[in-house]
Structures are given as C-alpha cells and as structure tokens.
Image (spheres, rainbow, N blue to C red):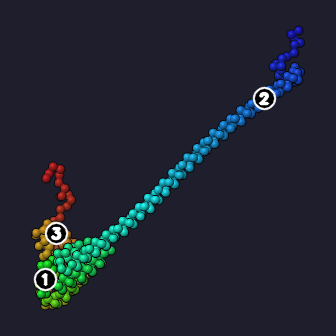
Amino acid sequence: MSENVPPKPQEATTPDELARISTVDELTRMKLAEEVTKLRAERSSLRMKAGAITQALVGFVALAGLCVNAYQSHASKAQQEHRDRTEQEKWNKEFARASQADKYRAFFETSMLATEAGNPDKRLVGYALLQEFVRDPIYDEKAMIMLEESLSQELRGAPKDKLDDVRRAAVRAILTSLAGTDDCRALQRASRSVDRVARYHAKSKDEGETREVVDIYVRRLVGRAAQVCNTPKDFAAVRQPIRDTMLANPELLGLNAPSEADANLLMAAILVQKCEEEIAYSGASDCPSILRAYAAICAKGSRDTPADKAACGVIQMSVSALAPVASSSQTVTKEGNP
C-alpha cells in the first residue's frame, strides 16, 4: 500500500512530476511566490545599486569640493602674492623717489654751504661734504664742476695774491674732495683743474704759493690715482696735466730745461716727502698703501720707460723703508697669549 502513495510536492524533482502532483491553484500560488521572490531580489539589487551610486556621487562631490578648495586656495595665494609684489614695487618706487628727493635736497643744501661767500667755515664744510657726491654716479659731474669752480674762486680771491690760512685750508679740502672718487676717469678730469693753479701762478708770480698748491695736487690726486688706476697708462693720464703745468712753469722745478723725467721724478719725490711727514705723526695715513700701489704700477712696466725710471726708483726706495706688512699667520696669536 505504501508503494502506491504519490510523492509530495516538495519531493518532485522535475517539472512533469510537479505538474502531476500539484493542482492548478497550487501552481498559481507557486508562480506568484516565485515572482514575488524575484521582485524582492530585483528591488534589493536596485537598492544596493542605488546605494553604491549614491556613495559614488557623494565621494565625487567630496573630491570635487577638495579640488575646488585647492584651486581657490591657490588662486587666493597667487592673488595675494601679486598684491604683495605690486605693493612692494610701489613702496620701492616711493622709497627711490623719496631717496632721490632727499639726495637732491642734500646736494642743494651742500651747494649753499660751499658757495657761502661771507662764511669761510661754512664753505669748508660744504667742500668736505661734496666728497660724498663726487662718489655718486648721478651727482659726480655736478659736484666736480662745483669744486673746480670753487677752486678758481678760492685762488682768485686770495688777498694780495697770497693764500692765507683759510684759503689754503679751502684749497686742500677741495682737492681732497676731488680725489675722493673711485673712478680713474674722474681723477683724470679732476687733475685737469690744475690749469686754475697755472692761472693763479701767472697772476701771483709766487713760486712758493704755487708750489704748495701743486704739492697738494700731487699728494691727493696722484696718490689717489696710484690706488684707483689699474694700468700705467691710466695712471699717467692723471699725472699728465700736473706734469705739463710743471713743465710750463720750470721755475717750480728749480731747473732751466726740465724734461718729462725730471717732472715725474719731482712728483714722486713730493709724494714720498708728504707721505713720510704723514707717517711720522699719523697712524691712520693711507700713504703706505699709496706707495705700494705706485710701486706695483712701476712693476707693470713704468720703471722700464726712461720718463719713469728715476721716479720709480725713488718710490721703490721709499717702499723698501716701510715696515713689512704682517701676514695673516703672524697676526693670529695662540690661545692664551696676549
């Protein structure tokens, strides 16, 4: 009897068996159940996809926000840097303009001092202050013109064709300022102002006064040229106007028919004499460096020329008598030693 019992629906293994053992109503319910299950699965899948898409959109929006923030930060930084540069350029231009205005005002005030006719002390201060403008590439030409003209006025205004102490100090201050430049070409121009001395000598006929002014020219201009001019040719260009003035006034040399070699020798002797006097009473004199620089110019070829052989010999003798320059190893003392 048990072998004839039909299988249960859940035990059916094929569609045919399921059709034989199930009624229409059961099959309909099973189909509806499968469709509902399928719809649930599809809905769950859609929900998962929607969640993934939503998360992807959220991540994309967040990434886009980071990019926008980074771009805005970069743009803001670039704009700030541009504003800073613009502001810095503005202040630089304003500072340069103010500096130029201050320098112009200082030059004007110094010029007023240098042209104070009734106060020799103010003139002396003005001559000394003009040395700062001789070193300035903007005002150097104006300052040198003013100093050269002031030299003419000081020599022309000497009472009784003699240089008193006040005007002698003024001449020395003027030539010191003219020699304050670091430009060899400017020194060449300054040395040409010696023609004022020639005109003064033609008027005064006083060899002593003129010789004193020439001595200042040699000490200041020729001495400075030895430090500034790098070649014998440039150095000779500074020395030439002074030498020509001496040759045109041979009584200054004490010779009847002086030559170029005699004039060069006399200038070298004047420079050595003035430097020896300075070194004897001043520990801050630049004469040792001047004499060594002159000797270096001689070593570059000047001593081999007939016009400079005797002058270079005098300079070399003076340099040999100077105290040797201490080397760096000699100046460094051991720890604990005085």
Disc 3 marks a residue whose amino acid type is Ser
Residue 336 appears left or right of 81: left
Residue 305 appears left or right of 274: right
Which image quarter is the N terminus in? Answer: top right
Q: Looking at the rendering, which quadrant does residue 106 occupy?
A: bottom left
In this view, the mark in front (3 or 2):
2
Residue at image x 38%, y 64%? Answer: 92
Query: How many angstroms separate mark 3 from mark 1 (CA)?
Result: 26 Å
Q: Looking at the rendering, which quadrant does residue 287 occupy?
A: bottom left
Residue 163 — which label? Answer: 1
Relative image position of residue 70 (x, y in whole percent):
53, 49
User: Sequence-wise, which precedes: disc 3 or disc 2?
Assistant: 2
Query: How many angstroms separate mark 3 from mark 2 (CA)?
Result: 115 Å
Residue at image x 18%, y 69%? Answer: 286
The residue at which mark 2 appears reads as 36
Disc 1 marks a residue whose amino acid type is Leu
Residue 140 appears left or right of 170: right
Q: Between 180 and 268, which is closer to the camera in this rendering? A: 180
Element on which disc 2 rests? helix
